[in-house]
Image: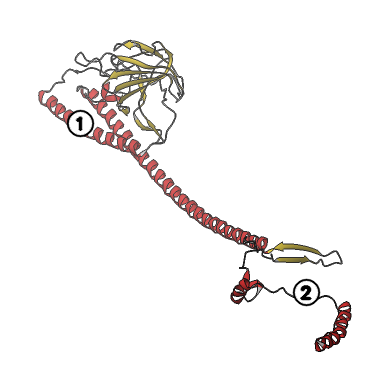
């Protein structure tokens, strides 16, 4: 007992000393001792940071991670002592700007390359077009020269035909059956009518020249046969020592032969002179798709076959007052430059019926009728139908 009391007495000064120090030192909070149940868990988790998984708070909720954005500052410093300007851009905006500049540069390069390519392509195309135009001009010039030669051959054949007719008249031989007489319907030649016309002048095409050359070839063959026949006839006359009477009908008759079909064009559409033939004319500068028969103003124009009027009136293509008659089977006749048209569309006409009166309307130099024969839309030489 005495010993315990001495220990208490000896410990009281120490406690008083500790109390004095406690009042001087700041309080220190010691960690609470964990219960025995948490001791085992303390062995597994060495620190409070390890106790809570990354990305979760104490309650187990996922915490949002915030990334710190990087910013770039561009400073604009003027040469003078002006204020310095700063442009602050985030990394995302800077990347977006660089990508836009790169895309723009690619577009510019592409557009520039396409422009250069288009320029060279257009230059090459223009060069080819110029070459083609030059070739076309050369071909047109050659075609024009060829048409002039064909026209000259046709003129020479016409002169030979006229010479043959003169010889037949002088010798009293019968007229050639295929001869085109450039005179009036009754056989007289006055030379007072020279009206010409047709559609507006059109440059001859290759088909026109080929057709003219074919006609020249056919006419040459006809003239050869006709001259041989004349030669034989003159020989017969010399043997018989006499002149046979002339026979045959004169061209220009308005009424066709009795054996001709009423729907086939036959005979002349008007009395007069052939002032312009079918084919190339005017030194080969124009292709004439019909023949021009000239006479006095108001001369009657008649249908050359039965048919139905499909056009009657003004034509703006150079024909003036015009009549078209459909005869069936793809055959059509045309009568142009009339002073007056006396039939109407849809009217049925007979061969020899008056359909118009001769005039000088449209592209015309004087009173005449422009006469065409078309087979399936293609013009043919009307001489074979007169």
The crowding category of the residue bearing disc 2, from other C-alpha atoms within 10 Å (few below 14, some 14 to 19, many at least 20), is few
Specify the quadrant of the image occupied by residue 140: top left
Q: Is residue 350 visible?
A: yes
Task: Judge left or right: residue 95 versus residue 299.
Answer: right
Q: Disc 1 vs disc 2: Cβ atoms closer than 8 Å? A: no
What residue is rendered at 85% in x and 67% in y? 80
Q: Which residue is mark 1?
A: 227
Please tell me whether residue 118 is drawn above or below residue 70 in the rendered image: above
What residue is rendered at 31% in x and 25% in y? 374
Depth check: give the residue in front, 258 or 225.
258
Please tell me whether residue 209 is drawn above or below residue 183 in the rendered image: below
Specify the quadrant of the image occupied by residue 161: top left
Task: Judge left or right: residue 83 versus residue 372.
Answer: right
Disc 1 or 2, which lies upstream in sequence?
2
Where does residue 309 sit, x and y in percent of width and height?
Answer: 35, 15
Depth check: give the residue in front, 179 or 34.
34
Depth check: give the residue in front, 25 or 271.
25
| Disc on res. 29 | 2
**How far separated are the C-alphas under marks 1 and 2?**
152 Å
Q: Secondary structure at mark 1?
A: helix
Depth check: give the residue in front, 386 or 73.
73
């Amino acid at each position: 007992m005495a010993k315990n009391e001495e220990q208490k007495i000896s410990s009281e000064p120490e406690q008083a000393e500790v109390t004095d120090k406690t009042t001087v030192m700041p309080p220190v909070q010691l960690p609470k001792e964990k219960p025995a149940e948490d001791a085992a868990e303390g062995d597994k988790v060495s620190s409070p940071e390890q106790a809570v998984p990354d990305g979760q708070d104490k309650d187990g909720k996922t915490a949002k991670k915030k990334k710190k954005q990087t910013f770039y500052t561009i400073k604009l410093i003027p040469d003078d002592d002006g204020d310095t300007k700063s442009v602050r851009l985030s990394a995302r905006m800077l990347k977006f700007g660089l990508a836009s500049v790169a895309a723009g540069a690619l577009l510019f390069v592409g557009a520039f390359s396409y422009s250069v390519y288009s320029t060279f392509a257009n230059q090459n195309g223009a060069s080819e077009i110029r070459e083609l135009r030059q070739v076309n001009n050369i071909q047109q010039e050659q075609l024009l020269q060829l048409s002039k030669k064909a026209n000259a051959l046709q003129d020479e054949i016409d002169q030979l035909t006229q010479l043959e007719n003169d010889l037949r008249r002088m010798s009293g031989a019968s007229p050639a059956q295929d001869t085109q007489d450039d005179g009036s319907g009754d056989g007289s030649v006055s030379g007072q009518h020279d009206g010409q016309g047709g559609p507006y002048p059109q440059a001859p095409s290759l088909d026109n020249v080929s057709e003219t050359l074919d006609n020249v070839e056919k006419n040459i063959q006809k003239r050869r046969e006709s001259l041989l026949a004349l030669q034989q006839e003159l020989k017969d006359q010399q043997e018989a020592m006499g002149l046979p009477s002339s026979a045959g009908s004169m061209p220009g008759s308005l009424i066709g032969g009795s054996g001709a079909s009423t729907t086939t064009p036959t005979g002349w559409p008007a009395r007069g002179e052939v002032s312009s033939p079918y084919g190339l004319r005017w030194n080969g500068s124009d292709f004439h798709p019909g023949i021009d028969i000239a006479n006095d103003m108001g001369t009657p124009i008649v249908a050359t076959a039965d048919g139905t009027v499909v056009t009657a009136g003004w034509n703006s293509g150079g024909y003036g007052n015009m009549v078209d008659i459909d005869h069936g089977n793809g055959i059509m006749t045309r009568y142009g430059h009339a002073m007056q048209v006396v039939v109407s569309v849809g009217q049925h006409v007979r061969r020899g019926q008056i359909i118009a009166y001769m005039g000088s309307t449209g592209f015309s130099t004087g009173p005449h009728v422009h006469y065409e024969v078309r087979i399936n839309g293609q013009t043919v030489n009307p001489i074979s139908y007169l």
